[in-house]
């Protein structure tokens, strides 16, 4: 079974791109969805528990809303359920750092991204020589599996 990682910001477009991609897959995917939550706090102020709990609650609600856009088991005979397993994580930290940690300590077959995720592609480039994960584009089927260099040649630079 293939394992895939997706970093989400909770956007509906990303959920719909994932949904469309899942409907084209011939075998189930073990998918981990990471919602990275960065909390802006002044450098000289510690993070307060109340602030963290409220942010985590809001992120959980956002992630649950996002998940409603994905196919559910048994909802359509033409689009069978494509998840062998679906894992979701809400992590406190910058998205690039959370992605780097996931790529380096866990083994994935694919890192899924859409063409607008420049930060994900840049982070992948930093890790690519230490991992065997392939980069897969959700939003442009003709570039389903491609090299990061090709991605940066097609997209505006940061």
Image (cartoon, rainbow, N blue to C red):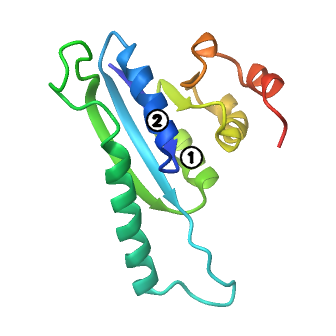
Q: Is residue 39 left or right of residue 30?
A: right
Q: Residue at x 23, y 18 (%)?
A: 80
For the question of whether residue 13 can be seen, the reply is: yes
Q: In terms of sequence position, does the residue under pointer 2 or pointer 1 come before the other?
A: 2
For the question of whether residue 6 can be seen, the reply is: no
Q: Residue at x 31, y 52 (%)?
A: 64
Is label 1 in a helix, a strand or a loop? Answer: helix
Q: Which residue is mark 2?
A: 5
Q: Residue at x 44, y 32 (%)?
A: 16
Q: Quadrant of the N terminus?
A: top left
Q: Which residue is mark 1?
A: 99
Q: Residue at x 42, y 22 (%)?
A: 20
- Percent across and percent down for residue 39 are 56, 72
- Judge whether 37 appears above or below 104 on screen: below
Residues tagged 2 and 1 counted as in contact (Cβ below 8 A): yes
Q: Quadrant of the C terminus?
A: top right
| Total residue callouts | 2
Residue closest to the eye, 78 or 144: 78
* Residue 60, quarter of picture: bottom left
- Percent across and percent down for residue 110 are 50, 25
Q: Is residue 147 left or right of residue 4?
A: right
Is label 2 in a helix, a strand or a loop? Answer: strand
């Amino acid at each position: 079974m293939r394992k895939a990682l997706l970093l989400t910001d909770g956007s509906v477009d990303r959920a719909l791109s994932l949904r469309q991609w899942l409907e084209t897959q011939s075998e189930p995917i073990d998918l981990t969805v990471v919602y990275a939550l960065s909390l802006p706090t002044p450098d000289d102020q510690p993070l307060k528990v109340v602030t963290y709990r409220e942010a985590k609650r809001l992120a959980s609600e956002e992630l649950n809303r996002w998940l409603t856009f994905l196919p559910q088991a048994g909802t359509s005979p033409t689009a069978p359920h494509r998840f062998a397993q679906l894992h979701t994580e809400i992590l406190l930290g910058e998205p690039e750092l959370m992605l780097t940690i996931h790529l380096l300590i866990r083994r994935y077959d694919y890192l899924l991204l859409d063409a607008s995720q420049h930060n994900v592609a840049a982070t992948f480039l930093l890790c690519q020589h230490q991992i065997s994960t392939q980069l897969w584009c959700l939003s442009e089927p003709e570039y389903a599996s491609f090299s990061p260099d090709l991605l940066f040649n097609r997209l505006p630079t940061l």
